[in-house]
Image (tube, rainbow, N blue to C red):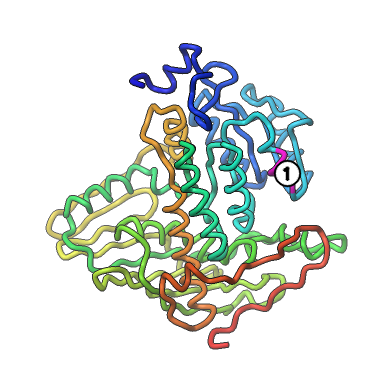
Amino acid sequence: MNNSRRNFLSTGAAAALAPYAFSTHTEQTIRVGVIGCGGRGTGAIRNSLAASPMVRIVALGDVFEERAQSTAAKLVNESRSTVTPETTFSGFDAFKKVLSTDVDMVILATPPHFRPQHFAAAVRAGKHVFMEKPVAVDAPGVRVVIEAAAQAKDKNLSVVSGTQRRHQQPYLEAMSQLRDGRIGDVRSASCWWNQGFLWRVDRTATMTDTEWQMRNWLYFTWLSGDHIVEQHIHNIDICNWALGGPPKSATGMGGREVRTGPEWGNIFDHFSIDFEYENDVRVTSWCRQIDGCTGKVAEEIVGTKGVLRTDGGRAIITGESPWRTKGGRNPYEQEHVDLIDSITQTGPYLNEGRRIAESTMTAIMGRDSAYSGKRLQWEEALNADVRLGPTDYAFGPLPVRPASVPGS
């Protein structure tokens, strides 16, 4: 078919589309369901609406009823929302109810523990997907995502993840310069996400173990994967991008230096990982969440002819052939623009499922090396059987797994 899918839809021939392809309910409309109505979910709603006039928000789901209801209330005056009480769901099965509605695409923005289950269900339901990073907290979850991403490709379903740097102009131009040889052969790299503390919700007398942990999901490894996975994945993903794939091994260290009380769950507050890639290229990653320390969020790629430095809003090359760039559209919107272009076939087909699964696994491998104090190989880390978190979900007792102690 020579016409773009958007043009094809305008002819009224949408019924002839292949199974699992983009379907339309009114001309040039993409019906979106949102699973996870916290800060990132509501942010993704704004980004998706800003990305295209085709977007309609039609269904919401969150494990907490007040979050789903609050988001629905915020959309009351949004002309491109058709959310109703009948399409606003809560509970651990809210994702199933959103997927059962007549949506074309879903935004997955719950805590990362639930991402593999939700992504696999969305693909089975024939929905296009925007899913926040990371996409798992353990190796079994990563394998689920890899399998579901392959199924999405077979069904011609578009998949974009929330690693917005992959859609950001300075990074795209920088990687083009790197591929063209401006810095020569890559010999090493470093990446950082060092900052202070993040938010925390105090426990109340009425909160069960499960509710308290889920409202503080950042601080429990089973929910977030720890901050190296949940946050530092952005920088690790850039190194994988620059080096053409995940590393061969990881040797890490880290610990709980400041956030030592039970209110901080069981995650570490700092990590340092030595990743080994092909051709003896080494990448050092640092991440820290400790108040009062020097902050840095950036990447640095060292080549035989120069050094590429990126820090979110700009990219600079120093050395034999200096170069710099900055600017571009808001990357949180651009990733949704690119997803919609993929869905409508006005741009290249995108399925970032396996790539983000591998970057997630890279961070998990670094975390598990630091937790255990042992050097880990890619294949053994990817094929590990340890699954984090409960298998049945309910608001009730849920003991906190002790923080890991390297060496034991």
In the displayed structure, would residue 155 be above or below residue 388?
above
Crowding at dot 1, Cα within 10 Å, few <14 / some 14-19 / many 20+, comes out as many
Residue that extends furthest to the top in the rendered view of this protein: 11
In the displayed structure, would residue 170 be above or below residue 211?
above
Residue 124 on the magenta span: no
Q: Position of residue 306 (x, y in %)?
A: 18, 61
Which quadrant of the structure image shows residue 202? bottom right
In the displayed structure, would residue 72 be above or below residue 226?
above
- Residue 243 shown left or right of residue 399 in the figure: left
Q: Residue at x 44, y 75 (%)?
A: 272
What residue range appears in magenta? 93-97
Quadrant in the picture for the N terminus: top left
Q: Residue at x 53, y 19 (%)?
A: 15
26 or 302: nearer the eye?
Answer: 26
130 or 391: nearer the eye?
Answer: 391
Q: Residue at x 17, y 54 (%)?
A: 182
Q: Which residue is mark 1?
A: 94
Label 1's element?
helix
Quadrant in the picture for the C terminus: bottom right
- Residue 329 shown left or right of residue 132 in the figure: left
- Residue 118 shown left or right of residue 69 in the figure: left
Q: Position of residue 116 (x, y in %)?
A: 58, 54
Q: Position of residue 68 (x, y in %)?
A: 73, 41
